[in-house]
Image (cartoon, helix red, strand yellow):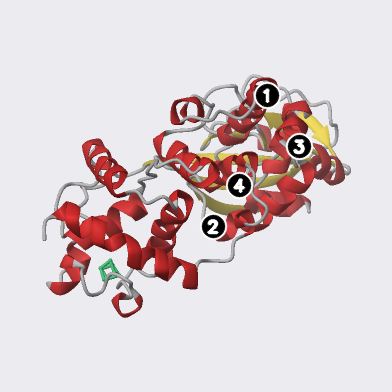
Amino acid sequence: MDDLNLLFSAVPPLLGWYRLHKRDLPWRKQRTPYTVLVSELMLQQTRVEAVKERYVHFLQRFPTAEALADANEEEVLKEWEGLGYYSRARNLHKAAKIIKSEGFPQTWIGVRALPGVGDYTAGAICSIALGLPSPAVDGNVLRILTRLLADGRNTDDIASKKYFSKRLEVVFPKEAGEFTEALMDLGATVCVPNGEPMCGACPWVSICKAHARGEELLFPVRAEKKARRVEDLSVYVFKCGEKYAIEKRPPGGLLAGLWGFPIVPLGLGEPYMKQGSLLATKKAKHIFTHVEWRMTGYLIKVDRCEVDFAPTFAPLTWATPEEIKARYAIPSAFRAFKEWIE
Ligand code: SF4
């Protein structure tokens, strides 16, 4: 059977399997195009388990695009706290303003033009929320399709995504949203990314070429990964009475415009340690997509909250733990040091 016919024959068993085994996820209840947009942006580069609870809170706080559009950016960032990749929150906020004034777009091109929406997210939103035959091809979908077809093309090559998108467009059934979510669920629960796939539970077990050859783990074929850049940094948690010093990070670069503890290349802030007494130190690590932060943190008691730490640090804001909790979004990169003030 050629690949296209194999794909056609894979659709009915996949839909049948999905109806019996679909995951119970909060964003699959009471859906609107706006709630699909929220969930898809939250799920970009973030695990389903980490999103579940945050999605519910976010929707309670901003139940409609209008409510989100009317909020200020600090409120939105605060509600996004801990999810990481904060540009998604800013993009969602901008998208809500567009939707408030122009309505939710009804075409792939219109959805794709929303801030923060790439090809995958546009495909997911269009198929799930609008019922359009728009494939959403990510690493999970590439994995299951390359296994089904025993296709050895390099899945890190952008052309591979385009190739499989075109193929899926041809076989897309009228149950567009179910099809997209069935592909997602098969990749998440059966044909899993780490370890052996559970072929015995797979609706494609009798047609999968990789399984027939016992070559499941040979697919997908990937390019060699580049190593992450490692940055060694010092994090200073200055304590003055009940208050702690935080700084707004610069508008560009990692965690742009968010709040955090003063952080500098390792060794650069050491003269400032002499301005107070050292209460504790700890080490922590945070991994971004291309960079790894290896941090040494110093909890330092100082006598005056007005100390000028320039030029090494940006102007500092002094706040109590309660004020920080209520008003300032501190990303999870600083989680280990935030424990000192909680
Ligand atoms: S049969 Fe196995 S390898 Fe093939 S798609 Fe299903 S789980 Fe993946």
Give the residue type that dot 1 points to: Lys
Give the structural element (helix, strand or loop) at label 1.
Answer: helix
- Mark 1 or 3: in front is 1
The image shows residue 3 at horizontal and vertical percentages of 15, 54
Mark 1 to mark 3: distance in Å? 23 Å
Give the structural element (helix, strand or loop) at label 3.
Answer: loop
In the rendered image, the quadrant that contains the C terminus is bottom right
Q: Which residue is mark 1?
A: 97
Mark 4 to mark 1: distance in Å? 22 Å
How crowded pointer 4 is (Cα within 10 Å; few <14, some 14-19, many 20+) is rated as many
From the viewer's side, name the closer residue of 189 and 157: 189
Q: Residue at x 69, y 20 (%)?
A: 101
How crowded pointer 1 is (Cα within 10 Å; few <14, some 14-19, many 20+) is rated as some
* Quadrant hosting ligand 1: bottom left
Q: Identify the disc placed on residue 327.
A: none
Going from N to C along the chain, the mark reached first, 3 or 2, is 2
Mark 2 to mark 4: distance in Å? 11 Å
Q: Residue at x 42, y 52 (%)?
A: 180
- Mark 4 or 1: in front is 1
Going from N to C along the chain, the mark reached first, 4 or 1, is 4
Going from N to C along the chain, the mark reached first, 2 or 4, is 2
Specify whether 288 is left or right of 212: right
Q: Which residue is mark 2?
A: 48
Q: Is residue 334 depicted above or below 48 in this figure?
A: above
Q: Which residue is mark 4?
A: 83
